[in-house]
Amino acid sequence: MKRWWMLAAIVLTLAMAGTVLAQGDTSIAYGETVEGEVTDSQFEVPFVFTGSEGDVIHARMVVDDSGEFYEPSLILLDADNSVVASYDGWYEATLLAALPADGEYTLLASRVGGRTGTDTGNFTLTLDLLSGIRVGEPVEGEMTNQDVVLYAVPADAPFTLEFERVSGDFAPELTINIMGEFGEFEVIGTAYGQTVRKLTLEVEPDPERAVDFYVIQLAQSQWDWNFDLASAQYRLTFTQ
């Protein structure tokens, strides 16, 4: 697999357009949201997509509020049906993975326990491709306090991350995360301040907790009590 030299980013919004109702062996493409149902007779719902080596994908499965579906599970298979990654969750499951080769992949939307599980219900599944920028070349973006912006950076060497809030009345919180056991983000570092305009973080991978990549997140802080719409323009630079 090619060495990661790309920094990946995606903006997640609350609105999901173009939702497709699907069941059985169904295709899904980057940027699409589909709906399905996990039942006792079909406890794994497959969604097929085509990807390229080095693609960083972000899949998010969210169950309905019927009260019968608590523990969703996402499984990523390659063309040989070998498991690339899998994550279980509570009400939602998030999977973030770098594809090892060009080809066809399958996302299995399921429940914890699979055949022996008991959860049933409807769900939505969103698949996104994180766009990339070259190391050392600043990326500029714009976001509001209703957005969540994600970046994935390789964890194979120490790196420096520089964040600058260029303009705007919104100060996002920056967190560095690893994927937890159940697909949740586990924060290992954070930086936030209403008056902060520019900051530089130097990160060295922890040999005791080896991971493929870190997830950089920009979002509204839980300590930001502004409920009005606010925006910010920012610049982010990643170097190794």
Image (tube, rainbow, N blue to C red):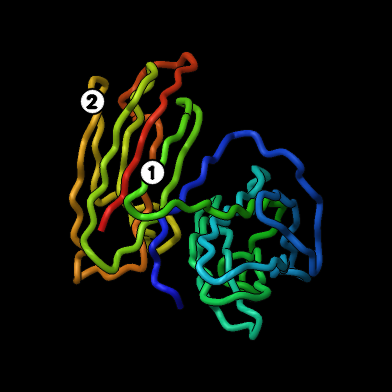
Q: Nearer the N terminus, badge 1 or badge 2? A: 2
State whether residue 109 is above or below residue 216: below
- Crowd rating for badge 1 (residues with CA inside 10 Å; few <14, some 14–19, many 20+): many
Q: CA distance from mark 1 to mark 2?
A: 16 Å
* Kind of residue at badge 2: Val
Look at mark 1 in the image and give the residue it sits on.
Answer: 217
Q: Quadrant of residue 230?
A: top left
Residue 153 percent coordinates (x, y): 36, 57
In the rendered structure, the answer to whether residue 238 lies left or right of residue 68 reads left
* Kind of residue at badge 1: Gln
The residue at 39%/38% (across/down) is 218
On the rendered image, what quadrant is the C terminus found in?
Answer: bottom left
Look at mark 2 in the image and give the residue it sits on.
Answer: 196
State whether residue 51 is above or below residue 81: above
Q: Nearer the viewer, mark 1 or mark 2?
A: 2
Toward the viewer: 208 or 29?
29
**Which numbered marker is on residue 209?**
none
Residue projecting furthest to the bottom: 80
In the rendered structure, the answer to whether residue 146 lies left or right of residue 68 reads left
The residue at 21%/35% (across/down) is 199
Q: Are marks 1 and 2 in contact (CB under 8 Å)?
A: no
